[in-house]
């Protein structure tokens, strides 16, 4: 560990102590203050939108500005507005019934802030994936420390500056650094730890949190399938799948990872997707609206995956592009891979790039069985004009979320909880689910000075026997 990292770790420990003290001094942050916190987040997005988009683009080599505006900045503004609008309803105590045998009394659930939370965020949407959990934490009345990814240093530094301008450091703060800082961060005794990133690191984070019994949310990845059912119009499937796969050059946790389509339709669908790509980007290599791959390491990995599939006999489709310019810009052209071998990395690892394997199936049930045989994905997409058939696909599979005849956008519906299941994660956020992630449901049973339950205490008599008899029914 470098000296700078060691210093950073000391600093974050001191900040955690300061945040905990500040939380104790204001355990129940009033709603008007929380609403002002949410406004501050939305305001910094509006005021610094250009700087945010530029920082992300610098980190990626090129990130389409339109993608940063819609998927990061506007997303965060809308998320903050939604939380502000519904905060009153979400935070209201809930009254629940009391059984006759426990009367008289009243019971209620108070939704209280957990305290100081840690947020670890990845590089692929470096602003949204740090700020959306922050919004949920602020809405719940928590204080937060954010550890962004080391792969997007410009965005991390800007986020640190903007949040330092908007919040006291004992309320919200950003800790920069790589895996060593991340590891130390996840070992701290937060009141909740919220991690977004790979399944591999997620496992380590879960273990670190378990040491201190820190509750943890894991927003992980996986291979999200798109299943095209027989008879679904090829052009319509291609437009939707092509758009979702190429957004942010496939570096999206819920991007369609691979396609299952009826046997014999693979080529037509693959060619239609390449046509969509050619329509979206005149030349992906030089078009600024096509995003680059975040690092040389990720770029080499994706190229290796294509070459492995090619060597295994798969057919590779790409639109016309300037190969030298693509390489210089660290861009992988939109790539469709027809029927790759089952054991190649494209079919065994999350791709996280603009490469789409298409496989044929003989029966729809065989497609759902393939999905069910693998780790539960973060998202599953089904393309079908027949509701019964689409529902059958849902009934025979499990996934974090679902899009029917659409992809990616289920995560933009604010009241849909967003999260994985099994290897794709645990817990959820967005909307009320996010508020609940950072809240503790505190149960309160209130009675008067005297309560008949006192008659149940030893020495046991008739009262006890009559109540116990009733309870055993
Ligand atoms: P990553 O796991 O490499 O890094 C995520 C964060 O963890 C970074 O801040 C990193 O510094 C930190 N980290 C690294 N090693 C650590 C350690 N040992 N202990 C603690 N923290 C550590 O993930 P990534 O490559 O940035 O992101 C890509 C992955 O994230 C993909 O698998 C993708 O599917 C997933 N993802 C999931 C979602 C979701 O919402 N479910 C969203 C985006 C990305």
Image (tube, rainbow, N blue to C red):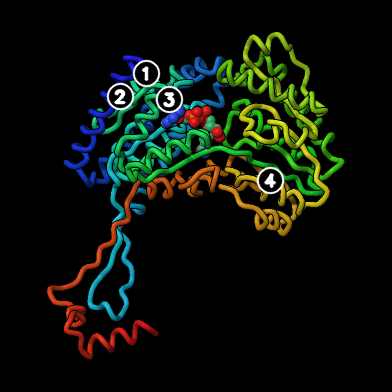
- Mark 3 and mark 1: span between their CA atoms? 10 Å
Q: Nearer the viewer, mark 2 or mark 1?
A: 1
Can residue 257 be seen in this snapshot?
Answer: yes
Q: CA distance from mark 4 to mark 3?
A: 38 Å
Label 3's element? helix
Compare marks 3 and 1 and give the one earlier in the sequence. Answer: 1
Residue 459's tag is none
Residue pointed to by mark 3: 179
Task: Sort mark 4 into few (<14), some (14-19) or many (20+) by Cα contacts within 10 Å.
Answer: some
- Looking at the rendered image, the quarter that the N terminus falls into is top left
Of the two numbered discs 2 and 3 on the same chain, state the one appearing first in sequence.
Answer: 2
Q: Label 4, label 2: how many angstroms apart (C-alpha)?
A: 46 Å
Q: Is residue 282 above or below residue 384?
A: above
- Residue on which disc 2 sits: 9
197 horizontally vs 216: left or right? right
Residue underneath mark 1: 1
Q: What numbered label is drawn on residue 405?
A: 4
| Residue in the picture at 73% in, 35% down | 343
Name the element at disc 4: loop
In this rendering, position of residue 47 left or right of residue 197: left
Q: Label 3 near label 4: C-beta < 8 Å? A: no
Residue 23 placement (x, y as % from top left): 22, 40
In the image, residue 112 above or below residue 316: below
Q: Label 3: how many residues lie within 10 Å, few (<14), some (14-19) or many (20+)?
A: few
Quarter location, residue 342:
top right
Mark 4 near mark 2, Cβ–Cβ under 8 Å?
no
Sequence-first tag of 2 and 1? 1
Circle 2: element type: helix
Q: Count of labels shown?
A: 4
Q: Residues within 10 Å of mark 2 (few under 14, many from 20)?
A: many
Are dots 2 and 3 in contact, CB under 8 Å? no
């Amino acid at each position: 560990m470098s000296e700078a990292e060691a210093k950073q770790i000391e600093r974050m420990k001191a900040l955690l102590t300061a945040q905990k003290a500040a939380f104790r001094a204001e355990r129940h942050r009033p709603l008007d203050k929380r609403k002002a916190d949410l406004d501050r987040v939305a305001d910094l997005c509006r005021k610094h939108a250009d700087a945010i988009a530029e920082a992300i683009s610098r980190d990626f080599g090129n990130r389409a500005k339109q993608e940063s505006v819609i998927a990061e900045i506007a997303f965060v503004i809308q998320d903050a507005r939604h939380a502000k609008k519904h905060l009153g309803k979400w935070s209201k105590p809930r009254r629940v019934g009391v059984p006759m045998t426990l009367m008289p009394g009243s019971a209620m659930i108070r939704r209280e802030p957990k305290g100081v939370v840690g947020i670890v965020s990845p590089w692929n949407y470096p602003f949204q994936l740090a700020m959306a959990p922050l919004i949920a934490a602020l809405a719940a009345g928590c204080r937060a420390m954010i550890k962004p990814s080391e792969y997007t240093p410009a965005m991390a530094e800007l986020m640190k500056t903007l949040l330092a301008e908007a919040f006291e450091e004992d309320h919200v703060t950003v800790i920069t650094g790589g895996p060593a800082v991340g590891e130390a961060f996840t070992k701290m005794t937060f009141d909740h730890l919220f991690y977004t990133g790979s399944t591999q690191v997620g496992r380590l984070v879960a273990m670190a949190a378990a040491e201190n019994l820190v509750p943890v949310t894991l927003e992980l990845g996986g291979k999200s399938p798109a299943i095209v059912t027989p008879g679904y119009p090829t052009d319509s499937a291609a437009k939707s799948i092509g758009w979702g796969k190429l957004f942010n050059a496939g570096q999206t946790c819920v991007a369609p990872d691979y396609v299952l389509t009826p046997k014999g339709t693979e080529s037509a669908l693959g060619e239609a997707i390449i046509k969509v790509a050619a329509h979206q980007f005149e030349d992906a290599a030089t078009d600024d609206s096509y995003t680059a791959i975040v690092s040389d390491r990720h770029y080499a990995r994706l190229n290796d995956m294509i070459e492995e599939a090619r060597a295994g006999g798969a057919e590779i489709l790409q639109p016309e592009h300037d190969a030298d310019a693509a390489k210089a810009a660290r861009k992988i052209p939109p790539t469709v891979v027809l029927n790759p071998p089952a054991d190649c990395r494209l079919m065994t690892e999350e791709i996280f790039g603009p490469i789409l394997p298409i496989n044929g199936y003989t029966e729809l049930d065989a497609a759902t069985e393939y999905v069910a045989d693998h780790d539960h994905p973060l998202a599953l997409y089904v393309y079908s004009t027949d509701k019964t058939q689409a529902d059958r696909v849902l009934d025979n599979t499990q996934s974090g979320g679902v899009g029917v005849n659409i992809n990616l956008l289920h995560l933009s519906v604010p009241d849909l909880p967003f999260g994985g299941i099994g290897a794709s994660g645990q817990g959820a956020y967005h909307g009320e689910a996010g508020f609940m992630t950072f809240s503790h449901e505190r149960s309160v049973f209130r009675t008067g000075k005297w309560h008949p339950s006192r008659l149940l205490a030893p020495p046991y008599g008739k009262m006890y026997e009559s109540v116990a008899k009733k309870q055993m029914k």
